[in-house]
Image (spheres, helix red, strand yellow):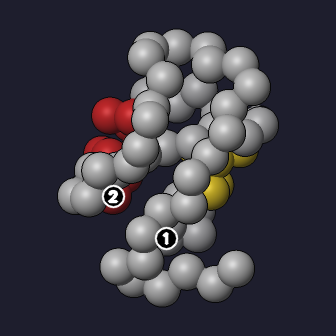
Amino acid sequence: MTLQMESPASSIQVEDWLRGEPLTNFQPGKVYIVDFGNLVRTMSGDDVPSGAAPGEIQGQRA
């Protein structure tokens, strides 16, 4: 699968939801961070430690 800018996000199937309410769909204009393990790869290609607060990541991108 190849995604381009403006490509709709693929659906995901979650076996165990850890926090918050499960998402039923992705909304345009919102940013979603999905943690698959110990590192999260950002859109800029940087690795951010798992568990980093979204505000910490946002501060690095501002």
Residue 42 is at least partly visible in this image: yes
Point 57% across, 52% down: residue: 11
Q: Label 2: which residue?
A: 61
Percent position of residue 8, x then y = 42, 69
Point 49% across, 70% down: residue: 44
What amino acid is found at the position of numbered circle 1 in the picture?
Ser
What amino acid is found at the position of numbered circle 2 in the picture?
Arg
Percent position of residue 29, x then y = 22, 58
Which quarter of the image is occupied by the C terminus? bottom left
In the foreground, 43 or 4: 4
Is residue 42 depicted above or below 12 in this figure? Answer: below
* Tag 1 and tag 2, C-beta contact below 8 Å: yes
Task: State which quadrant residue 61 falls in.
Answer: bottom left
Point 64% across, 84% down: residue: 2
Is residue 62 depicted above or below 24 in this figure? Answer: below
Q: Secondary structure at mark 1?
A: loop
Task: State which quadrant residue 10 falls in.
Answer: bottom right
Residue 49 is at least partly visible in this image: no
Percent position of residue 1, x then y = 70, 80
Q: Residues within 10 Å of mark 1 (few under 14, many from 20)?
A: few
Q: Which mark is residue 8?
A: none
Query: Does 47 sit left or right of 43 as displayed?
Result: right
In the foreground, 62 or 35: 35
Point 67% across, 39% down: residue: 13
Q: Label 1: which residue?
A: 44
Query: Does 53 sit left or right of 35 as displayed?
Result: left
Q: CA distance from mark 1 to mark 2?
A: 9 Å
Q: Residues within 10 Å of mark 2 (few under 14, many from 20)?
A: few
Task: State which quadrant residue 36 falls in.
Answer: top right
Q: Secondary structure at mark 2?
A: helix
Percent position of residue 23, x then y = 45, 32
